Amino acid sequence: MGNTGETCDRSIGRVLEALLRGALAGSRPWAAVEDGILREAYLTGGIYAAVAALPARTQSSIYHRAQRLGLERRRRWTTQDRERLCFLWDASHSLPWIARQLGRTLQTTYQRAQALGLALGCPQGYEYLTSAAHRCGYTAGQLRRILRWAGVAIHPALSRTARGRHRPHVVDPSDVDEALERWHRTEPVATAARRLDVCGETLKRRLALLGVSAPGGKRHFRVTPDQVAAALAIPRRGRCLQPQGATP
């Protein structure tokens, strides 16, 4: 039993030693040329410029190498930088996108927006998507699908998001109410076909003759009662398409 235990311990030790050698072999040392590229790019354009100049290195490795080399970059905010930040902020772009455009970190961009008094989180006149869904009696996923069907813009909230969490989104309450009103005035084509006891594919072809076709992507194909009535009234070989049981 003792020999078996010692043999097992030696085997485990050899496995761990092999894994350690593999890990060390995978960490490629920095060359002097790379350090020169890092210094020039980091000091002139920050971390994003360094990542672009060193595509074979990860952002994390570049950051730690810059720290080890003692590279610091404290670029002052000019009047042009502040004006551009305000312009991008008002355009409702996401915070990571704005930070990349300015060549700044998320924290620096967010702190500067706070100092300038820019609207953070949910802008005035908007509401969070989850709040709108609760107000209207839908889940956030259901409301998102309805708004996508109606072509309503869903904007990312201008806030920092903890790692692993979904970024919050905001919507215009008037757009939400209008989209829901349009949604309730329509019904799916399949539902209309079952209600009228007609072939669903035939109804779709008749709607296509009116210029009403299925939307692209995963958007719902919904129609109004007037569109259905107009499609059924299209003559077919001298006759209109009548629901089964209807009086001609």
Image (tube, rainbow, N blue to C red):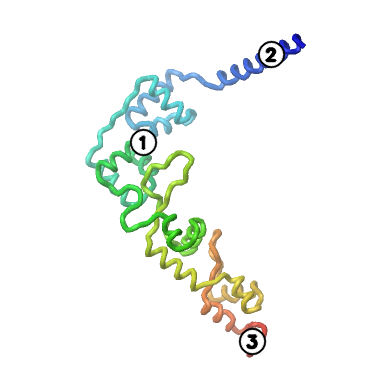
Between discs 2 and 3, the one toward the N terminus: 2
Q: In the rendered image, which quarter contains the N terminus?
A: top right
| The disc label shown at residue 9, or none | 2
For the residue pair 186 and 127, the one nearer the viewer reads as 127
Q: Within 10 Å of the Cα at label 1, are there few (<14), some (14-19), or many (20+) other Cα atoms?
A: some
The mark lying in front, picked from 2 and 3, is 2
Secondary structure beneath disc 2? Answer: helix
Graded by Cα atoms within 10 Å as few (under 14), some (14 to 19) or many (20 or more), the crowding at tag 2 reads: few
The CA distance from mark 1 to mark 2 is: 48 Å
State yes or no: discs 1 and 2 in contact (Cβ < 8 Å).
Answer: no
Is 195 on the left-hand or right-hand side of 71? right
- The mark lying in front, picked from 3 and 1, is 3
Q: Amino acid at mark 3?
A: Ala
Secondary-structure class at tag 1: loop
Q: Position of residue 84 (x, y in %)?
A: 28, 45
* Label 3 sits on residue: 246
Q: Which residue is mark 1?
A: 105
Q: Which mark is residue 180?
A: none
The residue at 47%/62% (across/down) is: 137
